[in-house]
Amino acid sequence: MTIIRLALLQTALLLAGFLFPFTIIAQQELKPAINWLTFEQVAASYKENPKPLLVFFYSNNDSSKLLLTTTFARKEVCVYTNTKYYPVKIDINSKADIKFMDGEVYKYNVAKQSHDLAIMLLGEKPEAPTVLLFDDKNTPYAFKGYKNYNDMLCQLVYISENVQKTTRYNIWAPAYYRTFPPDQKANRIPLAVNWLTLEEALKLNNEKPKGIFLTFFTKSSAASSVMLVNAFSHKQVAKYLDENFYCVRLDAQTSDTLIWDKEYYNTHGKGNYHDLAKIMMKDQMQFPSIFYFDRTNRLILSENLYLSPEAMYMLSNYVVSESYKTKAFADYIKTFKFEFQDIVPREFQNAAPASKPQ
């Protein structure tokens, strides 16, 4: 059986794309730290470089102090947060006036003994510590209480890689830990899909047409690794994909020459993305990304989001059954029935915002 080894986040897998800019040229190593910003600084940078917002609400209690001195002091968390988020920290009991992203100025509420901004974002009785993550639609997701660095990274990836658009956090977290098990150096996962090279898939689809399933990933995309371990290594899902498609998995940053209708190269420009990936993804470089092509290599549909085994099977069935020709996917899943027992039906776009995660 083919085995793939997935390193933990503390190794180069998740941070490979981010560590180089932070390499210290001098021999003396700097202590890792979150680059805490003000909302004014975030507003000034956001238009040119949009990223999710992280707001850390803290107080003078022991849990807040512990979170600051342990989890938020870990190199992995610091690098990922500084790279993927605009981080702001606020004392829920601060007496200072704070201008928020909505342009309003919030003050300390003497009657409620909390800052009005904390009350507005966290409710009448704000708790600390709380990490509030805003996605690309400015929807807040609250994670309350002390979290170790494994839990924090799981939460950070959930929002920064837009997993919340397809999967509830209580479904995502177990899938994440199957991929990146805490306190283990590696996870051995059977590779179920019969992955082919792009050249092999195009040749076979020409000789014996049945369609091509193509997915792009990057080594720095944790969601891509989680989908590999959970969706693509699910026996029934993998069997269904192999039966109905020639399957290809490509690194979107590969330096290989790839041939589709012509030769495509990696010119090593911004993001180091391959030209074929940029053209197929229309420069919307969000991973994992999947594409379904028909027997003539014509694109049927694509999706640039993390998919659970359930969602992957439903979407693939939607294509294979040619239901995409007559109905929207949102309507299709309302009556969809699974053919095997270990896949439990769930909605496709089913994330719950705000204070659901704990």
Image: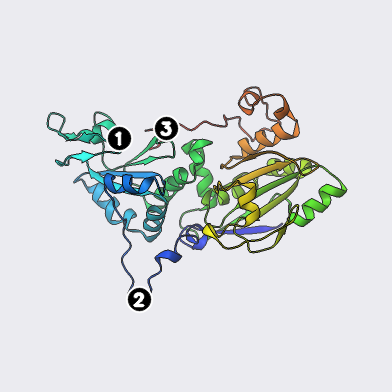
Q: Quadrant of residue 320?
A: top right
Nearer the observer: mark 3 or 1; the answer is: 1
Q: Residue at x 74, y 53 (%)?
A: 260
Calculate the distance from the C-alpha at mark 2 to the C-alpha at mark 3. 44 Å
Question: Height in image: 157 above or below 9?
Answer: above
Three-letter code for the amino acid on which mark 2 is drawn: Ala
Query: Is 242 left or right of 161, judged from the image as shown?
Result: right
At x 27%, y 31%, the residue is 120
Total of numbered circles in the picture? 3
Q: Residue at x 17, y 42 (%)?
A: 94
Circle nearer the N terminus (1, 2)? 2
Q: Which residue is mark 1?
A: 102
> Between marks 3 and 1, how big is the CA–CA gap?
19 Å
Q: In the rendering, at what x and y percent does residue 344 appear?
A: 61, 32
Q: Nearer the viewer, residue 232 or 19?
A: 19
In-image side of 217 versus 173 (left or right): right
Q: Nearer the viewer, mark 2 or mark 3?
A: 2
Residue 92 point in image, percent of width and height = 21, 40
How many C-alpha atoms fall within 10 Å of the one at disc 2: few (<14), some, or many (≥20)?
few
Image coordinates of residue 268 in percent, x first then y, are 57, 63
Three-letter amino acid code at the position of disc 3:
Pro
Indicate the quadrant containing the N terminus: top left, top right, bottom left or bottom right: bottom right
The residue at which mark 3 appears reads as 353
Q: Residue 90 vs residue 297: left or right?
A: left
124 or 40: which is nearer to us?
A: 40
Which SS class for mark 2?
loop
Q: Quadrant of residue 166?
A: top right
Image marks 3 and 1: residues in contact by CB distance under 8 Å: no
Q: Check disc 1 and report its element: helix, strand or loop.
A: loop
